[in-house]
Amino acid sequence: MQILHLDSSVLGDASASRSLSKAIVDDLLKERPTAHVVRRDLVDDAVSHLTGAIAAGFRSPSGAAIVDAATLAEHALSERLVSEFLASDVIVIGSPMYNFSVSSQLKAWIDRVAQPGRTFRYTSDGPVGMSGGRRVIVASTRGGMYSVGAPAQMDFQESYLKAFFGFLGITDVQFVRAERLSKGSDVREDSIRNARALVRNAVTQALAA
């Protein structure tokens, strides 16, 4: 079993999403101690944002020649990222909400693994996911409350991740959520404590799938 562990918060040790994603991975390892963990810190080891030249590495017209060494290195990175993803059984993602969506660091990773012919394919009836069978657990953190009420319409974080992985064919996407983290230390601690209590159930469901 391989676990792909991604973190995307810019807050380092102060990050709630990093703390929660680690708790999820630790719990997975308690159940599957022989599992191999591939760790990617998308902030400390940032993936470059997509450009036309980088995208040509997996969307290139037949016969296109690439001679620039830096671009070839980016193509090799795209291959490593998609291979890591496809080799993984469970993907654990630390994903804070930034301005109602995911961090740009996580989006850069997403743009590298959305590869036609590898993670999805085009058909006459539209795109079809090729990555089914994997499970995703997201440590989702928000400063406010976006899971209920009027602010829910501004949630382009969890809804986006669910839609993206669904596009790749992954329907088992769980969220371990901590909200209202900007509402004072007591509220923050209570929210994180409640989120940690959900980790066991998320792990159990992921391993039972």
Image (spheres, grey):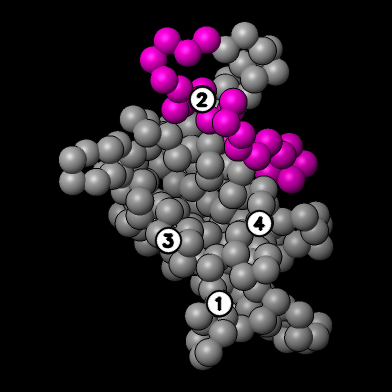
In terms of secondary structure, where does tag 1 sit? Answer: helix
In the image, the segment drawn in magenta is: 38-65
**Marks 3 and 4, the one that precedes in the sequence:** 4
Relative to 106, residue 73 above or below: above
Q: In the rendered structure, does residue 63 fall within the stretch colored magenta?
A: yes
Give the labeled residue for mark 4: 103
Spatial CA distance of label 4 from label 1 is 15 Å
Camera sees residue 35: no
Q: Quadrant of the C terminus?
A: bottom left
Between circles 4 and 1, the one closer to the viewer is 1
- The x, y position of residue 160, in whole percent, is 48, 62
**Marks 3 and 2, the one that precedes in the sequence:** 2
The residue located at (42%, 10%) in the rendering is: 63
**Marks 2 and 4, the one that precedes in the sequence:** 2
Residue 97 lies in quadrant:
bottom right
Give the labeled residue for mark 2: 56
Residue extending furthest toward the bottom: 149
Q: Amino acid at mark 1?
A: Met
In terms of secondary structure, where does tag 3 sit? Answer: helix
Residue 72 lies in quadrant:
top right
Spatial CA distance of label 2 from label 1 is 33 Å
Please rate how many residues cluster around mark 2, counting C-alpha atoms within 10 Å: few if below 14, some from 14 to 19, many from 20: some
Which dot marks residue 162? 3
- The x, y position of residue 92, in whole percent, is 53, 51
Spatial CA distance of label 3 from label 4 is 15 Å
Spatial CA distance of label 2 from label 4 is 24 Å
Q: In the rendered structure, does residue 128 fall within the stretch colored magenta?
A: no
Give the labeled residue for mark 1: 154
**Marks 1 and 3, the one that precedes in the sequence:** 1
1 and 3 marks in contact (CB < 8 Å): no
Q: Amino acid at mark 4?
A: Ser
